[in-house]
Amino acid sequence: MRRTVAVSLLAMMLGTLATACVAAASTSYVHSEALASTEWLNEQLDDPAVRVIATADCRQPTHRDSYAAGHIPGAIYLNVFAELSNPDSSVPLMILQPEGFESLMGRLGINSGTTVVVYDEGGGLWAAKLWWALRYYGHEDVKILNGGLAKWTAEDRPLETAEIAPTPTTFKACVVPELRASLEDVKLAIGNPGVRIIDALAETAYAAGHIPSARNLPAPGNIDQATQTILPLDDLAQLWLAADLEPDQLAITYCGAGYFGAFDLFVLYLMGHEKASLYDGSWMEWKANAELPVEASRTDA
């Protein structure tokens, strides 16, 4: 069955791709527009309609220092933990409410006419949360830099150390509810044949405990660790056999706090699977409720 699903999914992707314009055929992804190449971004650095946002793994104590040491010219730093999260939520690191998100994007100089490029030091595992948040609030013109800062610096492209102060603007949020799954949505998804729950955490974390019926697709596995770029489409299709995801199923992704889950969601979008949402509360919300079921995998097999 899994081989049939993979062939079906790949055929769907390639069929969609065949209708794309020739200019976009430099990559094999269905939604190649969601990825920015380093070559493309280098040519857009002087375009005032392009806003580059630098993020990082905010669990690391030096996350802010790396930006100060050198970032892509014009890039603005965003702490995706502190600034993107709702301070009034009882669940840590949940996305800002619409008004707060509007204020943040306006301060970053992002409006409806802005092309946003987000990046981190690697393949986009942390930048993906902002990619998802912008799309959730109705801004579709957002890309992740393929390979991130690692690829940019490996190619000896320009860096700067100056702090960027963008001109404030006005951003209007328009919620796209189908991109965000609630706790109740996930409870109803358990065992539902029309929904596939995807756990984006490492195998060890998944084995220790996960939402029942979830399949494990660790987010870093979608990245070529040597180049920090997204794997080719055919490699992704083989990797995602583990999800046993049918083209017509809804996918709900999650992780610890919605960051790696957002990256898996991004990869699904690249592959052409758009029936997908992020469980923003993720394991932080689920595990905090002792009444919710938890499934563990055998480690002695």
Image (spheres, rainbow, N blue to C red):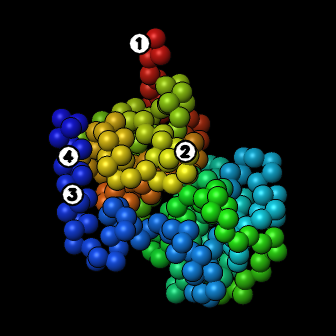
**Marker disc for residue 44:** none
For the point 73% across and 83% down, which residue is it? Answer: 166
Residue 36 visible in image: yes
* C-alpha gap between disc 4 and disc 1: 29 Å
Front disc: 3 or 2: 2
Instruction: Residue at 17%, 41% (x, y): give it.
Output: 4
Residue occupied by mark 3: 12
Of 121 and 80, nearer the camera is: 121
Q: Earlier in the sequence, mark 3 or mark 1?
A: 3
Please tell me whether mark 2 or mark 4 is closer to you in this view.
2
Establish if 144 lies above or below 47: above
Residue at 41%, 71% in the rendered image: 33
Mark nearest the camera among 4 and 1 is 4
Of circles 3 and 1, which is in front?
A: 3
Q: Name which of mark 2 and mark 4 comes first in the sequence.
A: 4
Name the residue tied to disc 2. 225
Disc 3 crowd rating (10 Å Cα; few below 14, some 14-19, many 20+) is: some
Q: Please report contact status of discs 2 and 4: CB closer than 8 Å, yes or no.
A: no
- Residue 182 position, x and y percent, is 45, 52
Assign a secondary structure to mark 3.
helix
Query: Which residue has dot 1 on it?
Result: 301
If you read the primary sequence from the N terminus, does the residue marked by circle 4 or circle 1 appear first?
Answer: 4
Label 1 sits on a secondary structure element that is loop
Question: Which amino acid type is marked by label 1?
Answer: Ala
User: Which kind of residue does numbered mark 4 sit on?
Assistant: Val
Element under disc 4: helix
Q: Amino acid at mark 2?
A: Gln
Q: Position of residue 82 (x, y in %)?
A: 72, 58
Badge 4: residue crowd in 10 Å (few <14, some 14–19, many ≥20) = some
Eyeballing the image, is 187 above or below 175?
above
